[in-house]
Image (spheres, helix red, strand yellow):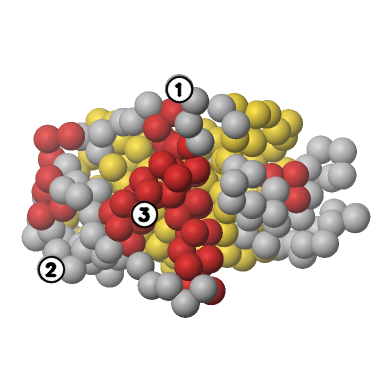
Amino acid sequence: MPTSPRPLALAACIALLACLGVRAHASQIPFAGSLTLTQIGTATTPQVNFSFNGLTVEALPGDTLNGTTLAITPNPPGFIMSGPITVQNGLDVAQFSSSGGTISVGNAATGTLDGDVQFIDIFSSSYSPGFFGVQIGLSNVTVTTGSSAVIDSWASNQGDGTLAFSFSSGPQTLNDLLTLGLPGSSFSNPQTDSLQGTVAPVPEPATLFLLGSCLLGLGLAYKRRLAAAGVSL
């Protein structure tokens, strides 16, 4: 029997938001910060480059990793998103043309987690215009244990992992995002926005990542609507 996915999605995304925004399960590392989107292409071949600012581990009260820096560093020339945009399972998806990069979190006291990152997709849904999700694969993850229980919990899961984050941007669609600052665009270049996400040690199927980050965007939109109506979660 066909059912509408929206009520189920909204219910599920509230649980997902609780995981990301309030507390993390076991080995998950929640983080937040900002990113700057810069148009480096042309009207015929738009390309948007990502840079990250002020990324810190959040929502891990009681763990020494809470509040430490998380670094996502691209190899030159950077993490570059480019068209064409395709539709996959009801989501608009743009592919990355990436030269790779690294992730690093922790320090000598807390323990460290280092690995290689590869951007895969950025996507949006018509259900939540202006919200975007990014899914990333981690490889060659290495862990040095320390005072952080969360870092230590990765010790038996070294090798691969996943990283996903979402952001809410001024542009309402991926096409708007790809044409930042170009003639006819109503959005400035560069564009800076906030983001939040998690690092997880167990690889997830791509479809679950697409769903999870989409639900996060839906949840943020739903939470805003509730707040505007004077309802608290």
Q: Earlier in the sequence, mark 1 or mark 3?
A: 1
- Packing grade of label 3 (10 A; few <14, some 14-19, many >=20) is some
Secondary structure beneath label 2: loop
Residue at 47% of width from left, 77% of height from top? 230
Visible in this render: residue 28?
A: yes
Q: Earlier in the sequence, mark 2 or mark 3?
A: 3
The image's mark for residue 1 is 1
Q: CA distance from mark 2 to mark 1?
A: 46 Å
Q: Position of residue 161 (x, y in %)?
A: 30, 35
Secondary structure beneath label 1: loop
Q: Nearer the viewer, residue 151 or 222?
A: 222
Above/below status of 49 relative to 205: below
- Residue wearing tag 2: 62
Residue at 67% of width from left, 62% of height from top? 170
Q: CA distance from mark 1 to mark 3?
A: 25 Å
Residue pushed farthest top?
1
Q: Earlier in the sequence, mark 2 or mark 1?
A: 1
Q: Nearer the viewer, residue 158 or 10?
A: 10
Residue at 69% of width from left, 37% of height from top? 82
| Residues at circles 2 and 3 in contact by the CB criterion of under 8 Å | no
- Packing grade of label 2 (10 A; few <14, some 14-19, many >=20) is few
- Quarter in which the C terminus is drawn: bottom left
- Residue wearing tag 3: 14
Q: Position of residue 215 (x, y in %)?
A: 45, 46
Amino acid at dot 3: Ile
